[in-house]
Amino acid sequence: MSNFPENGALELSRRYFEAAALPSLKKSFPELADVICAGLVGNGSECFGFDDELSRDHDWGVDFFVWLPESESAAIPDVAAWKTRLFAENPPEHARERSQYGGEVGVYTVPDYCRRLIGRGGVPDGLNEWINTPEENVAMLVNGDLFVDKTGEFTALREHLCEYIPEDLRLKRMSFCLMKIAQTGQYNFSRMLRRQDTVAARTCLSIFSDYVIYFAYLAARKFRPYYKWRYRAMPEIPCCDVKVRLKPLAEAPLSADGGLTDLIEDICAQLAQYLRAVGLSSSQSDFLTAQGEDVLARVQNERLRGLPSTYEI
């Protein structure tokens, strides 16, 4: 019988912070009581709400970040030392143990932590900065939870990030997704089957699924996490049920009998119907290359619109 706790590590960390860490921190650093921010965000499964028994084999358990304003950065070494003592003197039942490759859950200023994840100390400014911002890391910045944020600095940062990427960039990426979905699913998959190249056929299915998933994040204006959680966290597309159809697509044996190609075409038809419904395409074709070209034509920025439809940014 599993001995996995009823609550995930995020909730366990919140409880430990509120019961043990916050009173101790206020006592040890009363001057920081009105400026402290703490919580748990990042790349762990618990920060996406997906931790389970398997998560316990590495980098799982109770922990928390402390973020300070830049004006209090000199206190970081002392707060870090306090945190080490706290865990030694008052160990939680499920303490996190950092593995060789696990990320450090430490003490930072908000801008410095932001730089560690996305390469800049705040929200990207304009199209060029957003193009060069790693989307998976933005997903880490806005996941998890803040247990306390006295100044509101980190909360405001996360809210502004969640306003999402510039619309022209979203449309360009949607267009590229549609091109890849058409190329791998509607065109090359069946050709690879006819050639009996099962490795290439499976590759087509994998790329097809990945870009259907990416399209869903773009449609929902949500940041795509790294590959392990993409399908599980995949948002639903209004009036479509493509998410549920990706699982049988992955599980079915390769066959030239038309079953998989029919499923692919059904998914593509639903995406085309969605695009027409939300006014991103007027094309009546269910072949997604035509849809991708129509979406690209709606990009206002001339440089982006002028890039080849198959160019990924």
Image (cartoon, helix red, strand yellow):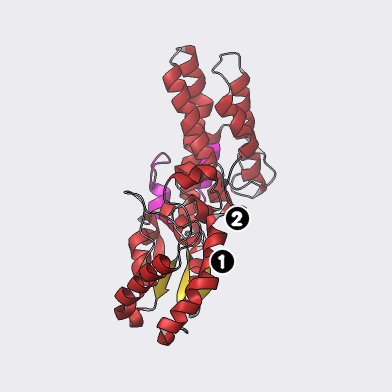
59 relative to 234 in the view: left or right: left
Q: Are marks 2 and 1 in contact (CB under 8 Å)?
A: yes
What amino acid is labelled 2 in the image? Asn
Residue 134, quarter of the rendered image:
bottom left
Residue 33 x/y as whole percent: 46, 83
Expressed as whole percent of the image width and height from the top left, the position of residue 217 reads 54, 49
Is residue 111 shown above or below 99? Answer: below
Residue at position x 54%, y 41% in the image? 231
Residue pushed farthest bottom?
Answer: 31
Q: Which residue is mark 2?
A: 7
Q: Which residue is mark 1?
A: 15
Q: Nearer the viewer, residue 62 or 307?
A: 62
- Percent of width and height locating residue 148: 52, 74
Q: Secondary structure at mark 2?
A: loop
Q: Quadrant of residue 79?
A: bottom left
Secondary element at tag 1: helix
Q: Amino acid at mark 1?
A: Arg
In the image, is 81 to the left or to the right of 251?
left
